[in-house]
Image: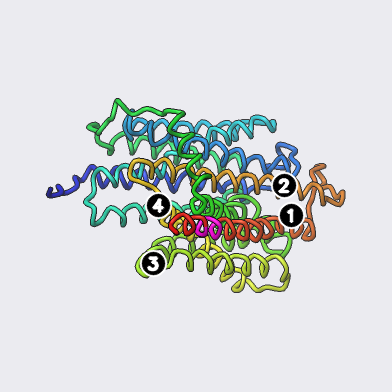
């Protein structure tokens, strides 16, 4: 069959949803930019503040599997427009809120809304673009999203420091409203809708059990958590405050340096998987990336005399190694069938996001455990360099421990398969 040329509406729809993916990434990392102000406004401990990241990620993860079914059944336009509204409502609740529960509920709304952004891009690319360019548009959407925090971090910090955090977040809401109206106009009305699409619990439980029964699949699922968690915890929540406290950097510089992690992830997300797929070196790529991640985290945490250039190189490298999450998905797809691949990969993605949410919460808990009793003038807890190193070391031990577990699970799975063949 000859593939028809995509319409201009398809390109516009893809671009619009890609910018929504960028927008939700900015919302995701925004609390990390205003950590002192949010903790002061809502009188949060570190553990409380961690919930702003972990709640977002938990509900983002919960929606990953339902999102595909909702888009198939209701159409990408309806789901994406509703998702943007959820993000705007969540951000609005944070702006007007004055209590911790309001801030937490706002992040739940944002997590639910953000969940379908990338799935929407994949849907538009899969349904409208020829197979020769489909992968390019899927990868380009991911790259656009990852550059969002890098582009927005410095202007947001400037707004926060010259006005206040509520005004800066109001600007984010205005940007969301503008994006919503643009997508109403440019996204086509005619959509391929599958009214028979259903979300059966039996299908989900079968896919989850498949991940746990097939040991290589479980190993790759564990490794996605190892690669995604450092990026998520550092870039989305704790990286900026760590650099400010440990390296005595101004917040604007710390924000700009921290967001370099997305430069590495965005660029390598297109190159590393392509190279490893070309040379069939999935496992080697995963192994060397895990080693590289451990070395970079160790250097950043335990060397207090790093220069700004060194910090930028380390954070870009962490971003590069984190892109090996895509290698895990590619390798895992070899153990699935066309009938099960979508749901199984969705389960693995949920695995990685839930893992990162747990580590986010753990870092906040450890900061409070190590807290030496210092308070700011507003009565909010202050955390020093030692507390941050202690808490963030949990990421390093998490990556080391799970990498070892994944290695033995994978080897055991291979041995069992070999014994069955013999």
- Tell me the chief SS of the magenta region: helix
Q: CA distance from mark 4 to mark 3?
A: 13 Å
Q: CA distance from mark 2 to mark 1?
A: 7 Å
Q: Residue at x 41, y 51 (%)?
A: 335
Q: CA distance from mark 1 to mark 3?
A: 37 Å
Q: In the rendered structure, are the residues bearing label 4 and label 2 in contact, judged by CB atoms less than 8 Å apart?
A: no
Q: Is residue 127 rendered to the left or right of residue 215? A: left
Q: In the rendered structure, are the residues bearing label 2 and label 3 in contact, judged by CB atoms less than 8 Å apart?
A: no
Q: CA distance from mark 4 to mark 2?
A: 35 Å
* Residue at which label 3 appears: 280
Q: Is residue 158 shown to the viewer in this render?
A: no
Mark sitting earlier along the chain (1/4)? 4
Which label belongs to residue 333? 4
Q: Is residue 371 rendered to the left or right of residue 82? A: right
Q: Does 92 appear in magenta? A: no
Determine whether the residue tagged by mark 4 lies in a helix, strand or loop. helix
Graded by Cα atoms within 10 Å as few (under 14), some (14 to 19) or many (20 or more), the crowding at tag 1 reads: many
Q: Position of residue 397 (x, y in %)?
A: 69, 59
User: Mark 2 or mark 3, which is nearer to you?
Assistant: 3
* Residue at which label 2 appears: 364
Q: In the rendered structure, are the residues bearing label 2 and label 1 in contact, judged by CB atoms less than 8 Å apart?
A: yes
Q: Position of residue 197 (x, y in %)?
A: 33, 29
Q: Is residue 386 shown to the viewer in this render?
A: yes
- The region drawn magenta spans 410-415
Q: CA distance from mark 1 to mark 4?
A: 35 Å
Residue 268 position by quadrant: bottom left
Q: Residue at x 19, y 45 (%)?
A: 7
Q: Residue at x 58, y 63 (%)?
A: 257
Which label belongs to residue 391? 1
């Amino acid at each position: 069959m000859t593939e028809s040329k995509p319409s201009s509406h398809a390109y516009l729809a893809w671009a619009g949803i890609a910018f929504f993916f960028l927008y939700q990434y900015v919302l995701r990392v925004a609390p990390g930019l205003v950590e002192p102000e949010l903790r002061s406004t809502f009188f949060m401990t570190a553990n409380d503040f961690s919930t702003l990241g972990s709640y977002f990620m938990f509900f983002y993860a919960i929606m990953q599997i339902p999102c595909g079914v909702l888009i198939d059944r209701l159409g990408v336009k309806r789901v994406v427009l509703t998702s943007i509204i959820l993000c705007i409502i969540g951000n609005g609740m944070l702006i007007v809120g004055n209590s911790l529960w309001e801030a937490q509920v706002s992040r739940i709304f944002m997590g639910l809304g953000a969940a379908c952004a990338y799935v929407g891009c994949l849907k538009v690319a899969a349904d409208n673009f020829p197979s020769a360019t489909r992968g390019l548009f899927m990868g380009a959407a991911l790259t656009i999203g990852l550059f969002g925090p890098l582009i927005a971090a410095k202007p947001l910090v400037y707004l926060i420091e010259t006005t206040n955090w509520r005004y800066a977040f109001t600007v984010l809401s205005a940007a969301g409203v503008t994006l919503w109206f643009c997508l109403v106009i440019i996204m086509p009305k005619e959509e391929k809708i599958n009214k028979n699409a259903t979300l059966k619990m039996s299908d989900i439980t079968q896919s989850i059990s498949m991940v746990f029964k097939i040991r290589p699949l479980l190993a790759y699922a564990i490794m996605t958590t190892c690669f995604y968690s450092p990026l998520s915890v550092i870039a989305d929540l704790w990286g900026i405050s760590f650099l400010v406290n440990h390296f005595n950097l101004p917040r604007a510089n710390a924000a700009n340096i921290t967001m370099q992690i997305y430069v590495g992830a965005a660029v390598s997300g297109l190159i590393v998987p392509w190279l490893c797929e070309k040379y069939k070196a999935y496992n080697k790529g995963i192994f060397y990336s895990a080693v590289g991640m451990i070395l970079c985290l160790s250097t950043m945490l335990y060397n207090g005399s790093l220069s700004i250039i060194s910090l930028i190189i380390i954070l870009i490298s962490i971003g590069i190694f984190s892109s090996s999450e895509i290698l895990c998905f590619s390798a895992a797809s070899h153990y699935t069938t066309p009938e099960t691949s979508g749901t199984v990969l969705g389960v693995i993605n949920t695995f990685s996001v839930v893992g990162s949410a747990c580590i986010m919460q753990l870092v906040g808990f450890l900061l409070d455990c190590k807290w030496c009793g210092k308070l700011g003038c507003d009565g909010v807890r202050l955390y020093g360099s030692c507390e941050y190193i202690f808490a963030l070391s949990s990421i390093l031990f998490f990556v080391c421990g799970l990498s070892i577990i994944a290695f033995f699970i994978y080897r055991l799975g291979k041995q069992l398969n070999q014994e069955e063949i013999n």
